[in-house]
Image: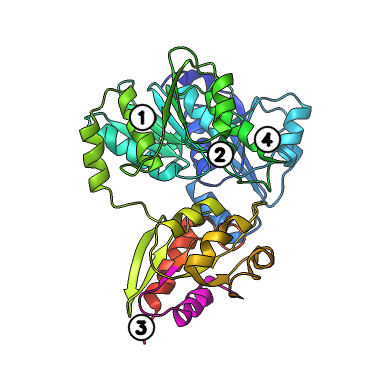
Amino acid sequence: MRNADYFKDKRITVVGCARSGGACANLLQRLGARVSVTDNATDPVVQRQARSVLSSGIAVEFGVHTPGFVSGADMVVISPGVPDTAAPIRWARERSIPIVSEIEVAWMLCPAPVIAVTGSNGKTTTTTLIGRVLAAAGKKTFVCGNIGTPFTGEVGSIQPQDWVVLEISSFQLEHIRTFKPKIALILNINPNHLDRYPGMREYAAAKERIALNQDATDFLVLNAGDSALKEIASRARAPKAVYFTGSPRRNQNQAAVEAVASILGIAPAVCAQVFDDFKGIEHRMEMVRQINRISFINDSKATTVESAVWALQNLACPVVLIAGGRDKGLDYRPILELARQKVKRVILIGEARAKIRAALSDALSVQEAGSLEEAVAQAYRAAAPGDCVLLSPMCASYDMFKDYEERGRKFKQAVLALNGE
């Protein structure tokens, strides 16, 4: 690792002890830092899980943030789900303590070039495909970040000759300082996370930070069909802009992968073979089961309206749609035009039920369910042979589940529990 001695003997506070926060805290302790973790989670189960992954010797507080965990720190590391309004972040600013993201910590240590992928939709699929294309071309590759394994959980194994393919969210980009990917890819910018950002301008600005430190040796890959990216291109420091666009032959995700491959000199035939072999990713248009000719599809990864629209565009059968969760400040009406053609019933769950009902009920048949299991049962009763039951929530999962992955697993469990009678 580069700069491994930088963190030695520093007092570092990690705010948030989810997957990336825990991995970062453990890494920093191994590097000789004096690490503390503060997390406001009050759920005893969440607390036990967090404690079980943290190394011994790390000071932890749960259920409350106290100034003592921040005062005197040399650095504060913020987990992606922690907003800037959180008390530890305010205290750090008042004391002029540097605040960085987990991504920044890993970047400071990483000896290998990074390909970073961001955007409102398609990040996970595109990141996965880039990783597989690089591997097929004979390059040792680490695929991590927002896709599953935290960057700080992998950086200790990465060598200079390797490649890192990193899925990165706007939240993770908010507190980078020196992060500098060799290739930065922005897939699209659509309304998302407007519960966190005042508006689209601020959300787009967070995404744009992926290219903040790029220079003439780097590449910025952009969607030629996304008007929001044209301004970003005009401000970018990296002069080597590469554009991609979808076509009948390749969807936008595949076109983005081919653009990255072209920069690295990887033959189109390698990409084509990877695309042919790719069976999709879990929780994104994942076929779970057929019962009495009714298909059940897990699209729990669809946390935006645009993702749900994309799912409907790729289904030819009538749909019973299960949607809802924690609202992200989105307008749900853009789904109406397509849903009128394809959706025979909408079943809503979670905190956003009332808002989504208000947006859709004048044009669609809408009902509510108290749990995901109840929604699956209702959807099965409403579907007919040849129909599809689609979980495509358009919302975050945090009102009912730990993350979208848990929501997807619970959906699959509920589907598999149906007896088919």
Q: Position of residue 59 (x, y in %)?
A: 61, 40
Where residue 101 appears, as percent x and y from the top left, is 58, 32
Q: Position of residue 65 (x, y in %)?
A: 72, 44
- The residue identified by callout 1 is 259
Relative depth, front residue between 261 and 46: 261
Marker disc for residue 420 = 3
Q: Which residue is mark 2?
A: 189
Q: Marks 1/4: CA distance? A: 27 Å
Percent across and percent down for residue 180 are: 49, 21
Quick check: 56 above or below 134?
Answer: below
Residue under the point 70% across and 25% down? 97
Query: Whole-Å distance between the Cαs marked 2 and 4?
Result: 11 Å
Q: In the rendered image, which residue does mark 4 sit on? A: 202
> Which residue is the extreme one toward the bottom?
421
Residue type, numbered disc 3 = Gly
Q: Is residue 8 visible?
A: no
Residue located 64% across and 37% down the image: 203
